[in-house]
Every structure is written in structure tokens, then in C-alpha cells.
Amino acid sequence: MALRVLGIDPGLTRCGIGVVDVAANRTAELVHFGVIRSHADAEIEARLLTIADGIDHILDEYRPQAVAVERVFAQHNLRTVMGTAQVSGIALAAAARRGLRVGHHTPSEVKAAVTGYGSAEKKQVAAMVTRILRLAAPPTPADAADALALALCHAWRIGSHVTSSGSAAETPAQRAWLEAERATRRDRAPRA
């Protein structure tokens, strides 16, 4: 049974979307890719609503079993980081409303999973996504190729850990990570 994964490369102007079906033997098939665009001159709330509506539409139309979102990391441009973080939050909430678990992967993790090299250039990532999915040409724009790479990375990480119902199960490493996160939150919780 194939696992359907939605990859989301969060961005406020262009939010990359990629949906793939990945079999237990790691072969992958393209389902859909594209970008959700918002206008730079619109108010932030309108831009976020546009992105939210687009993500909701993709989730409802393609019904993935798992979602992968690029982990937000610090950049020099604070506005870019803020927009990326806001869009990530929208993606997380949309997945949670549907009971979907979300995997978070850094750009380096994704590059390493797809190309074998954590510092690969965007062109190398796009070339490998093209090859893995047996496409005639690289997916464009780059945000869409990045979203497909995220989906592939996540599917390969959870790979054979799919329940009989087709939903993604946690690997032992993912369970350990989640438990460590829960313990950290418990330790930080205010005491009554």
C-alpha cells in the first residue's frame, strides 16, 4: 500500500505544495505539485487567508495520510522568517484539524535524503526529484520542487511504518523524539 504525503515548503509569496505516493519499496509517484501564491501588496491577514484556503483545498482534494513541513530556521531577513513561520503555523493547524501527523524537516535533512548531500544546490534537488519521480522536466517553480523533496524525505523516513489502515505510524526514533519534546514541555510548565 502506498503512503500519500503532502510536502509544504512554507512561504508567504509562494508556498510550495507537493503530493506524492510512495510505496514500501521507496518508489514514488507524482500526484500533484504547484504553489499557492499571495500578493505582496495585500494585507498580511488577506495573504495568510489565501495560503490557508489553498492548503485546505489541497488537503481536501488529495487526502494525504501524512504531511511534511520545512522546519523554520533563522535567516538574516526577519520579515522572511516571520512570513515563513506564519505559513508553517497555518499548515500545522490545517493538518491538525484533519488528525494528520506532521513531520518537520530541515533543508539539510531534505537535501541529504534526496541527493545524498546536505549542502546540495536547489538545481541538484530539482534534478533528483525529477529523476526519482520519473518526470520529463524539473518541477517549477523551485518552491514546488522543494515541497516534493520534503514529501519524499518524510515518506522515506516513515517508510515501512504504515498501519494497515494506511495511516503513517511513528518510527521508534520519532516516538523517542516526541517523548523528549513532551518531557521538555512538562519540565517548562508553570507549577501551581
Image: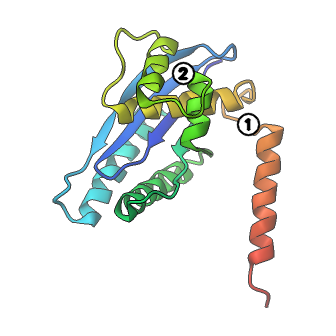
Q: What residue type is labelled 2?
A: Asp
Secondary structure at numbered mark 2: strand
> What is the tally of numbered marks visible in this picture?
2
User: Type of residue at label 1?
Assistant: Ala
Q: Is residue 174 left or right of residue 78?
A: right
- Mark with earlier residue (1, 2): 2
Residue at 59% in and 33% down? 118
Q: Position of residue 180 (x, y in %)?
A: 80, 58
| Above or below for 187 versus 33 | below
Residue situated furthest bottom in the rendering:
192
Image quadrant for the C terminus? bottom right
Residue placed under numbered mark 2 in the picture: 21
Q: x, y (%) of residue 162? A: 72, 29
Question: For residue 113, which quarter of the picture?
Answer: top right
Q: Looking at the image, which is closer to me, 1 or 184?
A: 184
Disc marking residue 35:
none
Residue position for label 1 = 169
Residue shown at the point (41%, 25%) measured from the top left: 123
Q: Which of 164 and 89 is in front in this view?
A: 89
